[in-house]
Image: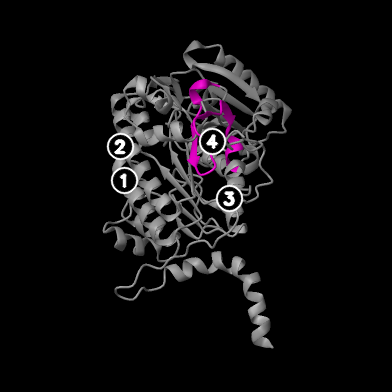
């Protein structure tokens, strides 16, 4: 009777236990000569998904590639064989971490909680810490939805992934100083045993989290392809950083940036080949997080706040007290008040911003208050949001005596308000059941996650935008 009862439970429990046991089975020792363990997701409704992000990829870098002489055959394949947006309207601010969290949740920063790349740290005790940790994220993700639907999940370097609960295999994005000890940190935070297994399979160390070079992207692509071949996850997220890194250094559309993009195109081809070998029915989605604008100068908004007595620093340049604090976010600043309900303080800061905006040297394009920020789904901690004019970017704290403006070492930046066409990002998708050659027009970034969830027969009910229709015409 017990044996019969247990047998009856097997079909009920198998879909539930498979994602839980998959990483344990897959990382178990393999006898010499045996095939690698496979934790392929069992048959189910929906299609597997590979989601690849190329940080900073502008839509026309692909859509107008032939006219510009850019050689990206693997990316162009999405345009011919799949569906594509002419642009994706992003979130406030148009930065990597808020945007990548929106790409996974279908919600704006006000909802998901990742409101900047770096954490708010007015007294500088977090040593430049970023929002690395999934614990800071408040919305349901594609990883969560996929696991609930019975798929296994894998991640290679996607932002805000440290400690993500529903990743079967996780190589999270994390760094601190760039010291070799960062390798130990990443290994400790990855799925137990995964780094060692993949390093042995690939014959090289896994790239440091701080490495944003093309070599780093190539390394992570090899590790991602190895993971796909070995484990055949149902959902894979892969993040590539080198294009954004080069666009900051030499400018968007520069010869150096084009060369990096052409090299990344080959990496996309490698990932697609591995995914389609593992899952011939897979859907492959290619996204980016923001566009780019050329820059020439940086604006130090801290200076007028110091002069107005809203920030106090000691002789060593450390901030010791503050009433209102700029929070840099690329081409913009969030302004956080120590007492946001203090009407007198709000009025004082508003008057200061009006005064600074009147100075052409400050390069301020617009100032939004709490109502405008809320309407844009932006940072709820901010009482004001300052957008800089194109060509200018937000400077970090450099001490109380740093000048208002100076020449920028960066040649390109993002983080401006999302309504700007220059800030639009990329969405392209191909695979079985996806309409070929369909122009989707300009779409909302929040529509991407529910679209991918639907393809996997998974649910993402908290998404703030409707899915995109990708089916071929009937």
The disc label shown at residue 241, or none: none
234 w.r.t. 330: above or below: below
Identify residue for label 3.
Answer: 456
Quadrant that contains the C terminus: top right
Identify residue for label 4.
Answer: 435
86 w.r.t. 192: above or below: above
- Element type where label 2 sits in the image: helix
Estimate how packed mark 1 is, as few (under 14), some (14 to 19) or many (20 or more) residues with alpha carbons within 10 Å: some
Identify residue for label 2.
Answer: 263
Query: Is 174 in the magenta?
Result: no
Residue 78 placement: quadrant = top left
At x 61%, y 53%, the residue is: 145
> From mark 1 to mark 2, how far is it between C-alphas?
9 Å
Q: Is residue 310 visible?
A: no
Q: How many marks?
A: 4
Residues tagged 3 and 4 counted as in contact (Cβ below 8 A): no
Estimate how packed mark 4 is, as few (under 14), some (14 to 19) or many (20 or more) residues with alpha carbons within 10 Å: many
Measuring from the top left, give residue 218's x and y in whole percent. Answer: 31, 45
Residues tagged 1 and 2 counted as in contact (Cβ below 8 A): yes
Quadrant that contains the N terminus: bottom right
Measuring from the top left, give residue 165's x and y in whole percent. Answer: 56, 58
The magenta segment: 420-449
- Element type where label 3 sits in the image: loop
On the picture, is 415 further left or further right than 46? left
- Which marked residue is nearer to the observer: mark 4 or mark 1? 4
Identify residue for label 1.
Answer: 218
Lower sequence index among marks 1 and 3:
1
């Amino acid at each position: 009777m017990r044996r019969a009862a247990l047998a009856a439970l097997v079909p009920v429990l198998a879909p539930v236990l498979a994602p839980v046991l998959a990483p344990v089975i897959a990382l178990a020792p393999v006898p010499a000569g045996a095939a690698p363990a496979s934790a392929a997701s069992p048959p189910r409704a929906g299609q597997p998904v590979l989601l690849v992000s190329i940080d900073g990829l502008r839509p026309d870098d692909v859509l107008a590639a032939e006219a510009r002489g850019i050689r990206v055959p693997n990316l162009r394949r999405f345009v011919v064989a799949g569906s594509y947006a002419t642009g994706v309207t992003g979130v406030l601010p148009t930065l990597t971490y808020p945007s990548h969290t929106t790409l996974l949740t279908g919600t704006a920063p006000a909802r998901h909680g990742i409101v900047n790349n770096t954490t708010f740290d007015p007294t500088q005790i977090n040593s430049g810490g970023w929002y690395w940790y999934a614990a800071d994220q408040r919305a349901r993700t594609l990883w969560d939805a996929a696991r609930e639907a019975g798929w296994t999940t894998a991640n290679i370097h996607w932002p805000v992934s440290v400690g993500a609960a529903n990743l079967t295999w996780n190589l999270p994005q994390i760094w601190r100083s760039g010291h070799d000890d960062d390798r130990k940190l990443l290994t400790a935070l990855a799925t137990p045993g995964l780094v060692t297994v993949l390093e042995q399979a690939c014959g090289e160390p896994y790239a440091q989290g701080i490495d944003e070079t093309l070599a780093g992207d190539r390394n992570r692509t090899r590790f991602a392809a190895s993971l796909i071949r070995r484990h055949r996850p149902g959902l894979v997220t892969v993040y590539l950083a080198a294009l954004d890194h080069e666009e900051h250094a030499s400018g968007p559309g520069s010869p150096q940036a084009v060369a990096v993009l052409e090299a990344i195109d080959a990496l996309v081809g490698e990932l697609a080949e591995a995914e389609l070998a593992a899952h011939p029915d897979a859907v492959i989605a290619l996204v980016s997080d923001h566009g780019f604008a050329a820059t020439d100068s940086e604006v130090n908004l801290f200076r007028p706040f110091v002069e107005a007595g809203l920030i106090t620093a000691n002789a060593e340049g450390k901030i010791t007290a503050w009433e209102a604090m700029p929070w840099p976010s690329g081409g913009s600043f969030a302004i956080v008040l120590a007492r946001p309900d203090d009407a007198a303080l709000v009025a004082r800061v508003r008057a200061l911003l009006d005064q600074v905006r009147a100075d052409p040297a400050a390069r301020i394009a617009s100032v939004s208050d709490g109502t405008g920020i809320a309407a844009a789904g932006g940072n709820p901690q901010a009482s004001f949001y300052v957008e800089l004019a194109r060509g200018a970017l937000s400077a970090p704290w450099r001490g109380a005596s740093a000048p208002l403006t100076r020449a920028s070492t960066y040649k390109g930046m993002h983080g401006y308000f999302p309504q700007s066409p220059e800030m639009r990002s990329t969405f392209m998708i191909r695979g079985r059941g996806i309409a070929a050659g369909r122009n989707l027009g300009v779409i909302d970034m929040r529509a991407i996650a529910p679209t991918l969830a639907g393809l996997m027969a998974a649910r993402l009910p908290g998404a703030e935008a409707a899915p995109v229709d990708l089916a071929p015409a009937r």
